[in-house]
Amino acid sequence: SVLETTFTGDEEATSGKSQNYLLSIQNIGSEKIDNIIAQIKLPTGFYLENSEPVLEANSEPEWKNISLEPGAKTEIKLTGSFAADVAGFEYFDSEVSIMSGNELLSQSKAQTFTDVKGSAIALQLVAAGSSVDTSLFLGTDLRTSITYENTSDEEMTEVAILLDFAST
């Protein structure tokens, strides 16, 4: 292969904290290469917050139409975080290919991993007096209560609880 890739990232992570990853692609050949495609398979429970180059909203982590001169290198930077229910080793897989006509020719694969420390917070949300799905009449006040507990032996700092309400 004339494309060499390396994939690096934070070796340890805590749920909810931003993590950084870097995919480097280098043309080690003697000719310019066009139509390079880089794809990254993200682990379940990893939420991509930012990338350079930027991806379109709600699109798969795939970068197309990359061109590299001989010896040139490009980098794809990712920032994201793991969900609270993720723990253990999580793997990121990348594949760099060249589009030749209608055929995708795989050139290089790389992998990195992160050891995610599981969440140590027990969280309970009570809305309208219930901890299960409940209905309200339009115009009715919605009262909520959140309780949380540190279930680990270590002190936690900078805890943030984010709520995302959606109607069904």
Image (cartoon, rainbow, N blue to C red):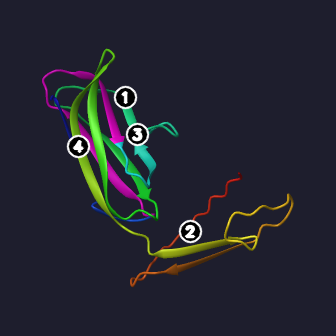
> How far apart in space, not on screen, are marks 2 and 1 (Cα)?
36 Å
**Amino acid type of the residue tagged 3 in the rendering:** Pro
Residue 161's mark? Answer: 2
Q: Does the CB distance between marks 2 and 3 fall below 8 Å?
A: no
Q: Helix, strand, or loop for circle 1? A: strand
Q: Residue at x 46, y 60 (%)?
A: 83
Q: Residue at x 75, y 74 (%)?
A: 129
Label 1 neighbour load within 10 Å: few <14, some 14-19, many 20+ = some
Q: Does the CB distance between marks 1 and 3 fall below 8 Å?
A: no
Residue 61's mark? Answer: 3
Residue 23 is one of the magenta-drawn residues: yes
> How far apart in space, not on screen, are marks 3 and 4 (Cα)?
15 Å
Q: How many marks?
A: 4
Q: Residue at x 46, y 65 (%)?
A: 84
**Amino acid type of the residue tagged 4 in the rendering:** Ala
Q: Does the CB distance between marks 4 and 1 fall below 8 Å?
A: no
Question: Which residue, given by chain and number where applicable, does mark 4 sit on?
Answer: 110
Q: Which residues are magenta?
A: 16-40
Compared with residue 103, is residue 44 higher up or lower down, i.e. above or below? Answer: below
Q: Earlier in the sequence, mark 2 or mark 4?
A: 4
Residue 64's mark? Answer: 1
Residue 99 in the image: state x and y as whole percent: 30, 22
Residue 61 in the image: state x and y as whole percent: 40, 39
Q: Is residue 9 visible?
A: no
Q: Earlier in the sequence, mark 2 or mark 1?
A: 1
